[in-house]
Image (cartoon, rainbow, N blue to C red):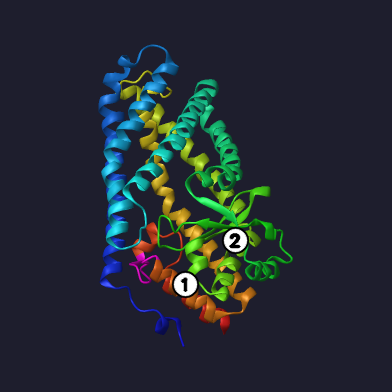
Protein backbone atom coordinates (compact mmCIF):
# COMPACT_ATOMS: atom_id res chain seq x y z
CA UNK A 1 0.00 0.00 0.00
CA UNK A 2 1.40 3.41 -0.92
CA UNK A 3 1.64 6.38 1.42
CA UNK A 4 -0.90 8.31 -0.68
CA UNK A 5 -3.49 5.61 -0.05
CA UNK A 6 -2.93 5.76 3.70
CA UNK A 7 -3.27 9.49 4.26
CA UNK A 8 -6.36 11.41 3.23
CA UNK A 9 -6.18 15.00 1.96
CA UNK A 10 -6.59 17.67 4.60
CA UNK A 11 -10.15 18.37 5.66
CA UNK A 12 -11.64 21.86 5.23
CA UNK A 13 -11.20 22.33 8.98
CA UNK A 14 -7.46 21.58 8.82
CA UNK A 15 -7.02 23.84 5.79
CA UNK A 16 -8.86 26.62 7.59
CA UNK A 17 -6.82 26.18 10.78
CA UNK A 18 -3.50 26.29 8.93
CA UNK A 19 -4.59 29.26 6.84
CA UNK A 20 -5.65 31.23 9.91
CA UNK A 21 -2.43 30.42 11.79
CA UNK A 22 -0.30 31.56 8.86
CA UNK A 23 -2.42 34.69 8.40
CA UNK A 24 -2.00 35.56 12.07
CA UNK A 25 1.77 35.04 11.85
CA UNK A 26 2.02 37.23 8.76
CA UNK A 27 -0.14 39.91 10.36
CA UNK A 28 2.07 39.86 13.45
CA UNK A 29 5.24 40.20 11.38
CA UNK A 30 3.75 42.97 9.23
CA UNK A 31 2.48 44.94 12.23
CA UNK A 32 5.86 44.59 13.95
CA UNK A 33 7.71 45.85 10.89
CA UNK A 34 5.34 48.80 10.47
CA UNK A 35 5.83 49.78 14.11
CA UNK A 36 9.62 49.52 13.73
CA UNK A 37 9.38 51.84 10.72
CA UNK A 38 7.24 54.32 12.67
CA UNK A 39 9.64 54.33 15.62
CA UNK A 40 12.89 54.08 13.68
CA UNK A 41 12.21 56.39 10.74
CA UNK A 42 9.75 58.94 12.13
CA UNK A 43 9.37 59.11 15.91
CA UNK A 44 12.87 58.08 16.97
CA UNK A 45 14.84 61.00 15.49
CA UNK A 46 12.45 63.55 17.02
CA UNK A 47 12.38 61.87 20.43
CA UNK A 48 16.11 61.20 20.73
CA UNK A 49 16.74 64.34 22.82
CA UNK A 50 13.99 63.36 25.29
CA UNK A 51 16.03 60.36 26.40
CA UNK A 52 18.76 62.48 27.97
CA UNK A 53 22.52 62.76 27.33
CA UNK A 54 23.66 59.62 29.20
CA UNK A 55 23.89 56.89 26.57
CA UNK A 56 23.20 53.94 28.90
CA UNK A 57 20.05 55.60 30.21
CA UNK A 58 19.10 56.45 26.64
CA UNK A 59 19.56 52.80 25.70
CA UNK A 60 17.47 51.51 28.63
CA UNK A 61 14.71 53.99 27.86
CA UNK A 62 14.73 53.17 24.13
CA UNK A 63 14.68 49.42 24.85
CA UNK A 64 11.80 49.77 27.32
CA UNK A 65 9.68 51.91 24.97
CA UNK A 66 10.40 49.70 21.99
CA UNK A 67 9.86 46.36 23.75
CA UNK A 68 6.75 47.30 25.71
CA UNK A 69 5.03 49.14 22.86
CA UNK A 70 5.70 46.30 20.40
CA UNK A 71 4.34 43.71 22.83
CA UNK A 72 1.20 45.76 23.54
CA UNK A 73 0.63 46.25 19.83
CA UNK A 74 0.97 42.57 18.91
CA UNK A 75 -0.65 41.08 22.03
CA UNK A 76 -4.14 40.77 20.44
CA UNK A 77 -2.70 38.72 17.58
CA UNK A 78 -0.74 36.52 20.00
CA UNK A 79 -3.93 35.92 21.99
CA UNK A 80 -5.89 35.14 18.83
CA UNK A 81 -3.30 32.73 17.43
CA UNK A 82 -2.10 31.14 20.67
CA UNK A 83 -5.37 30.88 22.59
CA UNK A 84 -8.47 31.53 20.50
CA UNK A 85 -7.54 29.44 17.46
CA UNK A 86 -6.11 26.59 19.52
CA UNK A 87 -9.39 26.33 21.46
CA UNK A 88 -11.56 26.86 18.41
CA UNK A 89 -10.01 23.79 16.77
CA UNK A 90 -9.95 21.69 19.98
CA UNK A 91 -6.16 21.62 20.22
CA UNK A 92 -5.65 23.34 23.57
CA UNK A 93 -6.18 22.29 27.18
CA UNK A 94 -5.05 25.65 28.58
CA UNK A 95 -7.21 27.90 30.68
CA UNK A 96 -7.04 31.62 30.03
CA UNK A 97 -5.26 32.15 33.34
CA UNK A 98 -2.76 29.43 32.43
CA UNK A 99 -2.09 31.03 29.06
CA UNK A 100 -1.65 34.47 30.63
CA UNK A 101 0.68 33.12 33.34
CA UNK A 102 2.87 31.51 30.72
CA UNK A 103 3.03 34.86 28.90
CA UNK A 104 4.03 36.56 32.14
CA UNK A 105 6.83 34.05 32.67
CA UNK A 106 7.88 34.66 29.08
CA UNK A 107 8.00 38.41 29.73
CA UNK A 108 10.07 37.94 32.88
CA UNK A 109 12.58 35.54 31.33
CA UNK A 110 12.56 37.05 27.86
CA UNK A 111 12.59 40.62 29.14
CA UNK A 112 15.64 40.13 31.33
CA UNK A 113 17.42 38.08 28.68
CA UNK A 114 16.48 40.49 25.88
CA UNK A 115 17.60 43.55 27.80
CA UNK A 116 20.88 41.84 28.70
CA UNK A 117 21.52 40.99 25.06
CA UNK A 118 20.66 44.52 23.90
CA UNK A 119 23.02 46.03 26.47
CA UNK A 120 25.71 43.53 25.49
CA UNK A 121 25.26 44.35 21.81
CA UNK A 122 25.59 48.10 22.35
CA UNK A 123 28.58 47.57 24.65
CA UNK A 124 30.24 45.78 21.74
CA UNK A 125 29.17 48.55 19.33
CA UNK A 126 30.59 51.29 21.54
CA UNK A 127 33.81 49.41 22.27
CA UNK A 128 34.64 48.21 18.74
CA UNK A 129 33.10 50.93 16.55
CA UNK A 130 32.82 50.12 12.86
CA UNK A 131 33.92 46.52 13.45
CA UNK A 132 31.10 45.77 15.89
CA UNK A 133 29.42 43.38 13.46
CA UNK A 134 32.41 41.03 13.58
CA UNK A 135 32.62 40.99 17.37
CA UNK A 136 28.82 40.77 17.68
CA UNK A 137 28.90 37.57 15.62
CA UNK A 138 31.42 36.07 18.04
CA UNK A 139 29.19 37.18 20.91
CA UNK A 140 26.16 35.61 19.21
CA UNK A 141 28.03 32.30 18.97
CA UNK A 142 28.92 32.43 22.66
CA UNK A 143 25.34 33.21 23.68
CA UNK A 144 24.02 30.43 21.40
CA UNK A 145 26.33 27.85 22.97
CA UNK A 146 25.50 28.95 26.52
CA UNK A 147 21.74 29.02 25.94
CA UNK A 148 21.96 25.71 24.08
CA UNK A 149 23.36 24.10 27.22
CA UNK A 150 20.95 25.85 29.58
CA UNK A 151 17.74 25.45 27.59
CA UNK A 152 16.75 21.88 28.56
CA UNK A 153 17.98 22.01 32.16
CA UNK A 154 17.16 25.56 33.27
CA UNK A 155 14.85 27.41 30.89
CA UNK A 156 12.48 24.71 29.59
CA UNK A 157 11.48 23.47 33.09
CA UNK A 158 10.23 26.98 33.89
CA UNK A 159 7.52 26.55 31.27
CA UNK A 160 6.96 22.77 31.23
CA UNK A 161 7.27 19.90 33.65
CA UNK A 162 10.16 17.68 32.54
CA UNK A 163 10.75 14.25 34.09
CA UNK A 164 13.09 11.39 33.36
CA UNK A 165 11.43 8.66 31.31
CA UNK A 166 10.84 5.61 33.51
CA UNK A 167 9.24 3.13 31.09
CA UNK A 168 11.65 0.18 31.22
CA UNK A 169 10.42 -1.46 28.02
CA UNK A 170 10.80 1.75 26.02
CA UNK A 171 14.21 2.43 27.50
CA UNK A 172 15.33 -1.02 26.43
CA UNK A 173 14.23 -0.25 22.86
CA UNK A 174 16.01 3.09 22.99
CA UNK A 175 19.17 1.51 24.35
CA UNK A 176 19.43 -0.67 21.25
CA UNK A 177 18.92 2.35 18.99
CA UNK A 178 21.60 4.40 20.74
CA UNK A 179 24.18 1.59 20.74
CA UNK A 180 27.21 2.76 18.82
CA UNK A 181 26.26 6.44 19.09
CA UNK A 182 27.38 8.97 21.69
CA UNK A 183 23.82 9.69 22.80
CA UNK A 184 23.45 8.32 26.34
CA UNK A 185 20.25 6.53 27.26
CA UNK A 186 20.15 8.69 30.44
CA UNK A 187 19.22 11.57 28.17
CA UNK A 188 15.61 10.55 27.47
CA UNK A 189 12.99 12.72 29.17
CA UNK A 190 9.24 13.12 29.16
CA UNK A 191 7.97 16.60 28.34
CA UNK A 192 4.57 17.14 29.94
CA UNK A 193 2.63 18.95 27.24
CA UNK A 194 -0.87 17.63 27.95
CA UNK A 195 -1.70 20.34 30.48
CA UNK A 196 -1.56 22.81 27.61
CA UNK A 197 -2.13 21.05 24.32
CA UNK A 198 -3.47 17.97 22.57
CA UNK A 199 -0.65 18.13 20.02
CA UNK A 200 2.22 15.63 20.02
CA UNK A 201 5.87 16.54 19.69
CA UNK A 202 9.43 15.35 20.23
CA UNK A 203 12.78 17.11 20.07
CA UNK A 204 16.52 16.79 20.46
CA UNK A 205 17.69 19.58 22.76
CA UNK A 206 20.81 20.72 24.56
CA UNK A 207 24.53 20.76 23.89
CA UNK A 208 27.32 18.70 25.39
CA UNK A 209 26.36 16.94 28.60
CA UNK A 210 22.88 18.51 28.55
CA UNK A 211 22.01 16.85 25.22
CA UNK A 212 18.78 14.88 25.56
CA UNK A 213 15.76 13.60 23.70
CA UNK A 214 12.44 15.06 24.81
CA UNK A 215 9.27 13.09 24.14
CA UNK A 216 5.90 14.74 24.72
CA UNK A 217 3.57 12.92 27.12
CA UNK A 218 0.81 13.26 24.51
CA UNK A 219 2.96 11.23 22.15
CA UNK A 220 3.87 8.65 24.79
CA UNK A 221 0.22 8.19 25.74
CA UNK A 222 -1.25 7.80 22.25
CA UNK A 223 1.48 6.15 20.18
CA UNK A 224 2.36 2.47 20.17
CA UNK A 225 5.84 1.40 21.37
CA UNK A 226 6.84 0.76 17.74
CA UNK A 227 5.72 4.25 16.69
CA UNK A 228 7.52 5.83 19.64
CA UNK A 229 10.61 3.88 18.66
CA UNK A 230 10.49 5.39 15.16
CA UNK A 231 10.11 8.91 16.57
CA UNK A 232 13.00 8.34 18.96
CA UNK A 233 15.16 6.96 16.14
CA UNK A 234 14.42 10.12 14.17
CA UNK A 235 15.79 12.25 17.04
CA UNK A 236 18.84 9.97 17.29
CA UNK A 237 19.32 10.61 13.58
CA UNK A 238 19.67 14.32 14.25
CA UNK A 239 22.40 13.51 16.76
CA UNK A 240 24.22 11.01 14.55
CA UNK A 241 24.23 13.40 11.58
CA UNK A 242 25.45 16.29 13.78
CA UNK A 243 22.61 18.51 12.65
CA UNK A 244 22.81 20.88 15.60
CA UNK A 245 26.48 21.88 15.15
CA UNK A 246 25.97 22.05 11.39
CA UNK A 247 23.01 24.37 11.86
CA UNK A 248 25.02 26.58 14.21
CA UNK A 249 27.88 26.74 11.70
CA UNK A 250 25.53 27.83 8.91
CA UNK A 251 23.87 30.39 11.18
CA UNK A 252 27.26 31.88 12.02
CA UNK A 253 27.65 32.75 8.34
CA UNK A 254 24.11 34.14 8.14
CA UNK A 255 24.64 36.13 11.34
CA UNK A 256 27.96 37.57 10.17
CA UNK A 257 26.48 38.67 6.85
CA UNK A 258 23.36 39.98 8.57
CA UNK A 259 25.27 42.09 11.09
CA UNK A 260 27.62 43.39 8.39
CA UNK A 261 24.73 44.41 6.12
CA UNK A 262 22.89 45.98 9.04
CA UNK A 263 25.98 48.03 9.88
CA UNK A 264 26.17 49.36 6.32
CA UNK A 265 22.48 50.29 6.31
CA UNK A 266 22.70 51.96 9.73
CA UNK A 267 25.83 53.90 8.78
CA UNK A 268 24.06 55.36 5.75
CA UNK A 269 20.56 55.86 7.14
CA UNK A 270 20.97 56.84 10.79
CA UNK A 271 22.70 60.23 10.28
CA UNK A 272 20.38 61.12 7.40
CA UNK A 273 17.34 60.45 9.56
CA UNK A 274 18.65 62.73 12.32
CA UNK A 275 20.39 60.34 14.69
CA UNK A 276 23.82 61.25 16.06
CA UNK A 277 25.42 58.21 14.40
CA UNK A 278 24.84 54.52 13.72
CA UNK A 279 25.56 53.77 17.39
CA UNK A 280 22.96 56.18 18.76
CA UNK A 281 20.86 54.13 21.24
CA UNK A 282 17.77 56.05 20.18
CA UNK A 283 18.12 54.26 16.81
CA UNK A 284 17.45 50.89 18.46
CA UNK A 285 14.15 50.36 16.55
CA UNK A 286 15.96 51.17 13.31
CA UNK A 287 18.63 48.59 14.15
CA UNK A 288 15.99 45.94 14.81
CA UNK A 289 14.13 46.85 11.63
CA UNK A 290 17.22 46.20 9.51
CA UNK A 291 18.07 43.02 11.43
CA UNK A 292 14.51 41.75 10.95
CA UNK A 293 14.51 42.48 7.22
CA UNK A 294 17.83 40.67 6.80
CA UNK A 295 16.57 37.75 8.91
CA UNK A 296 13.43 37.43 6.79
CA UNK A 297 15.60 37.00 3.71
CA UNK A 298 17.45 34.11 5.36
CA UNK A 299 14.35 32.34 6.71
CA UNK A 300 13.56 30.36 3.51
CA UNK A 301 17.19 29.24 3.32
CA UNK A 302 17.22 28.19 6.96
CA UNK A 303 13.95 26.32 6.49
CA UNK A 304 15.36 24.55 3.44
CA UNK A 305 18.37 23.44 5.49
CA UNK A 306 16.07 22.27 8.29
CA UNK A 307 13.94 20.25 5.85
CA UNK A 308 17.10 18.62 4.51
CA UNK A 309 18.10 17.63 8.04
CA UNK A 310 14.61 16.26 8.74
CA UNK A 311 14.79 14.08 5.61
CA UNK A 312 18.13 12.69 6.77
CA UNK A 313 16.71 11.95 10.22
CA UNK A 314 13.65 10.28 8.66
CA UNK A 315 15.85 8.07 6.53
CA UNK A 316 17.98 7.18 9.55
CA UNK A 317 14.85 6.19 11.51
CA UNK A 318 13.64 3.97 8.67
CA UNK A 319 17.02 2.30 8.21
CA UNK A 320 17.52 1.65 11.93
CA UNK A 321 14.02 0.45 12.83
CA UNK A 322 13.24 -1.24 9.49
CA UNK A 323 9.59 -0.71 10.37
CA UNK A 324 7.92 1.24 7.57
CA UNK A 325 4.44 0.42 8.89
CA UNK A 326 5.17 2.05 12.26
CA UNK A 327 6.85 4.97 10.50
CA UNK A 328 3.76 5.60 8.35
CA UNK A 329 1.29 5.21 11.20
CA UNK A 330 3.34 7.49 13.46
CA UNK A 331 3.37 10.35 10.96
CA UNK A 332 -0.30 9.88 10.11
CA UNK A 333 -1.08 10.18 13.83
CA UNK A 334 1.10 13.29 14.08
CA UNK A 335 -0.74 14.85 11.15
CA UNK A 336 -4.13 14.16 12.72
CA UNK A 337 -3.21 15.19 16.28
CA UNK A 338 -1.50 18.43 15.17
CA UNK A 339 -4.00 19.20 12.39
CA UNK A 340 -1.15 19.39 9.88
CA UNK A 341 -1.86 19.90 6.20
CA UNK A 342 -0.21 16.98 4.37
CA UNK A 343 -0.45 18.80 1.02
CA UNK A 344 0.33 22.50 1.51
CA UNK A 345 0.88 24.77 -1.46
CA UNK A 346 4.56 24.49 -2.52
CA UNK A 347 5.16 28.18 -1.85
CA UNK A 348 3.68 27.88 1.63
CA UNK A 349 5.94 24.91 2.35
CA UNK A 350 8.96 26.76 0.92
CA UNK A 351 8.54 29.89 3.06
CA UNK A 352 6.98 28.56 6.27
CA UNK A 353 7.79 24.86 6.75
CA UNK A 354 10.96 23.82 8.58
CA UNK A 355 9.81 20.17 8.23
CA UNK A 356 8.83 18.48 4.96
CA UNK A 357 5.07 18.10 4.47
CA UNK A 358 3.68 14.86 5.88
CA UNK A 359 2.85 13.46 2.43
CA UNK A 360 6.47 13.85 1.38
CA UNK A 361 7.71 12.23 4.58
CA UNK A 362 5.46 9.24 4.06
CA UNK A 363 6.58 8.88 0.48
CA UNK A 364 10.19 8.58 1.66
CA UNK A 365 9.22 5.32 3.36
CA UNK A 366 8.37 3.83 -0.05
CA UNK A 367 11.81 4.82 -1.39
CA UNK A 368 13.76 3.41 1.57
CA UNK A 369 11.73 0.20 1.72
CA UNK A 370 12.28 -0.58 -1.97
Which of 62/340 is in front? 340
Locate residue 256 relative to residue 17 in the image: left or right.
Answer: right
**What's the mark number on residue 49?**
none
Which residue sits furthest right? 180
Q: Dividing the picture into quarters, in which one does residue 169 lie?
A: bottom right
Per the model, the C-alpha gap separating discs 2 and 1 is 17 Å
Please check the rendered image and state whether residue 339 is part of the magenta-colored stretch, yes or no.
yes
Question: Which residue is pictured at 35% across the width and 68% down the height?
Answer: 341
The local secondary structure at tag 2 comes to helix
Q: Nearer the viewer, residue 323 or 27?
A: 323
Could you say where residue 279 lies in the image, as x and y percent from the top left?
Answer: 43, 23
Q: Mark 1 highlights which residue?
A: 331
State yes or no: residue 136 in magenta.
Answer: no
Q: Residue at x 26, y 71 (%)?
A: 12
Is residue 22 visible to us here?
yes
Direction from residue 206 to residue 351 in the image, left or right: left
Q: Earlier in the sequence, mark 2 or mark 1?
A: 2
Majority secondary structure in the magenta region = loop
> Does residue 96 sit above or below 131 in this rendering?
below
Percent position of residue 181, x then y:
71, 62
Q: Residue at x 37, y 47 (%)?
A: 98
Asked whether 330 or 220 is in front, the reply is: 220
Q: Is residue 203 above or below residue 324?
A: above
Q: Return the x and y of residue 365 as percentages of the image width and height.
A: 52, 78
- How many numbered dots are placed on residues in this image? 2
Q: Secondary structure at mark 1?
A: helix
Q: Quadrant of the C terminus?
A: bottom right
Q: Which residues are magenta?
A: 338-346
User: Which label sits on residue 238?
Assistant: 2
Amino acid sequence: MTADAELKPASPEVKRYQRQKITAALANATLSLIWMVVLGFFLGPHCADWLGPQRWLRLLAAAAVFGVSLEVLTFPLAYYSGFVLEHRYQLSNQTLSGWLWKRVKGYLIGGVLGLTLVCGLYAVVWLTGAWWWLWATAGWLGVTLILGRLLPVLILPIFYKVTRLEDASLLERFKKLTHGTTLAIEGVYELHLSQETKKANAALAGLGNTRRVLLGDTLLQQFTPEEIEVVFAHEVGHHVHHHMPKSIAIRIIFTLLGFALTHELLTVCAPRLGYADFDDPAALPLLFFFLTIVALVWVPLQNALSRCHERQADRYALEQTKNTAAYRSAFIKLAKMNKSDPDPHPMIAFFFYDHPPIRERLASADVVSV
